[in-house]
Amino acid sequence: MRKLHLVLILSLSMAQGIAREYTCYEYISGNYQDSFSHQITLDEYTPTSDHLKDQCISAFKALLKKYKCPLIKIKQKIKCGTALKGVNTTRICYLETKEGYYLFSKDFLDNINIIYNRWD
């Protein structure tokens, strides 16, 4: 009987972990859309420096925390550049994960706009 209780408890624990990851991905992807946008306000993330790259990493962690997501394994380093050459206000960053890729931009109110795109 005791073994049955232990198996039941372990099964429920594993099911909760799977459900949380599923729910997280559902939120991040906007219910499995091809792409979905998020906005992280300055109240939700703490910039660690003036560099956009560091701010995007901080905002990405805040996004994961907001939806109670486990840390997502990052395939590569985050890359940043400008969408329009010589126009600093068009700086964007790019990040890949196994679930898809993310584009980050910062508006004039210090919000970080994050666009999730699913791999196809």
Image (cartoon, rainbow, N blue to C red):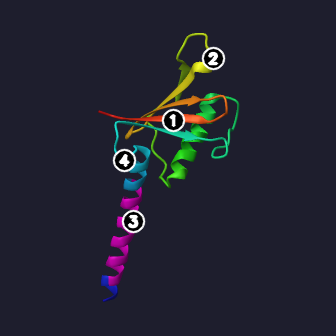
Q: Position of residue 34 (x, y in %)?
A: 34, 36
Q: Amino acid at mark 4?
A: Asn
Disc 2 vs disc 4: Cβ atoms closer than 8 Å?
Answer: no
The residue labelled by disc 2 is 88
Say which quarter of the image contains residue 36. top left
Residue at disc 1, secondary structure: strand
Q: Does residue 78 appear left or right of residue 50 in this picture? A: left
Badge 4 is on which residue?
31
Q: Neighbour class for label 1 at 10 Å: few (<14), some, many (≥20)? A: many
Q: Label 4, label 3: how many angstroms apart (C-alpha)?
A: 19 Å
* Residue 18 forms part of the magenta stretch: yes
Q: Which residue is mark 3?
A: 16
- As measured in the structure, the alpha-carbon distance from the residue carrying label 1 to the one carrying label 4 is 16 Å
- The image shows residue 16, relative to residue 117, as above or below, that is below
Give the Cα separation between the discs numbered 2 and 4: 33 Å
Residue mark closest to the camera, 3 vs 1: 1
Of labels 4 and 3, earlier in sequence is 3
Question: Looking at numbered disc 3 in the image, what kind of residue is underneath it?
Answer: Gln
- Which residue is at a point 39% across and 65% down the rendered structure image? 16
**Mark 4 Cα within 10 Å, few/some/many (few <14, many 20+)?**
few
Q: Nearer the viewer, mark 3 or mark 2?
A: 2
For the residue labelled by badge 3, is the local secondary structure a helix, a strand or a loop? helix
Q: Is residue 99 left or right of residue 52?
A: left
- The three-letter amino acid code for the residue at tag 2 is Asn
Number of the label disc, if any, that sits on residue 114:
1
The answer to whether residue 50 is magenta is: no
| Badge 2 density bin: few <14, some 14–19, many ≥20, Cα 10 Å | few
Instruction: Identify the residue at the far top of this view.
Output: 86
